[in-house]
Amino acid sequence: FPSHDISKYVASFVIVPICFKNKIYGNIVFCFKKREKFPKSKRNLCVFIGNGLAQAITIHRLVQSEYEARSLYKRNEAYFKALIKNTNEVVSLMDDKGKIKYISSSILKLGGYNENEIIGRNLQDYLYDADDVAHFKSCLKNILSMPGTECAVELKLKHKNGIALTLEIVALNMLSHPSIRGIVLNIRDITERKNLEIAKENKILLEEEKQKVSFIADATHELRTPLAIIRGNVDRVLS
């Protein structure tokens, strides 16, 4: 209280702590012009007022915190979607059985499928043949036994128009992560790269074949020359 005399304004007062579950937010001071007695009923009332205010402050802070957390989540979600929307790679989340829980919208550009056509389905439904399904199952088996591990596999995916795409898929086991609880897939289309590799291999094989043909032709020519000479000499002797 100030140093000057306030006795003509305040004859008695009570200090009520604003607290809830051992959390103290402050105090309320009730001042009275007359002398007051504070029986148990009034003391209980003061405690009720203090606790009520503390609970109201606590609830307000929790609501504010929840609002800020949701706002942050929405901003992060928007940022994440914008980030993966403008990339050629596809990000997906699936459960331990291969059922797709989420897939980025870039799947439309890669495979011709809408997100809703794939979510809820099994990735195996879109693989090209039985060998690809077997490779995918083997990859899953390897990472399911140990959380946090990953595997990389090349598989063929059926494009919506029927053609086969060669994909490089990196699967990361994050089933034990409380915020993810799934297997994260990073999917990249490597069809063009694989076609270039095949074309390069075919070119090398064709070049090797040409060299073989040329060698055989040269060898045949070298063999024919002495045979022709021998045949000519035999003809002369016989004549």
Image (cartoon, rainbow, N blue to C red):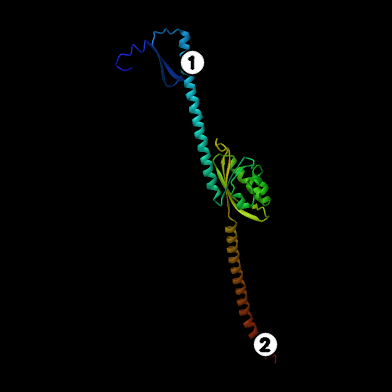
Classify residue 214 as left or right of residue 52.
right
Q: What element carries label 1?
A: helix
Q: In this view, does 210 lie above or below 103?
A: below
- Residue identified by numbered label 2: 234
What amino acid type should be assigned to the residue bearing mark 1?
Phe
Classify residue 50 as left or right of residue 125.
left
Please give the label number shown on residue 48: 1
Specify whether residue 21 is in view.
no
Question: What residue is shown at x 60% (from left), y 74% (from top)?
Answer: 214
Residue 94 lies in quadrant: top right
Q: Is residue 91 above or below residue 193?
A: above
Question: What residue is shown at x 52% (from left), y 38% (from top)?
Answer: 73
Classify residue 15 as left or right of residue 116.
left
Specify whether residue 132 is in view.
yes
The CA span between labels 2 and 1 is 133 Å
What amino acid type should be assigned to the residue bearing mark 2?
Val
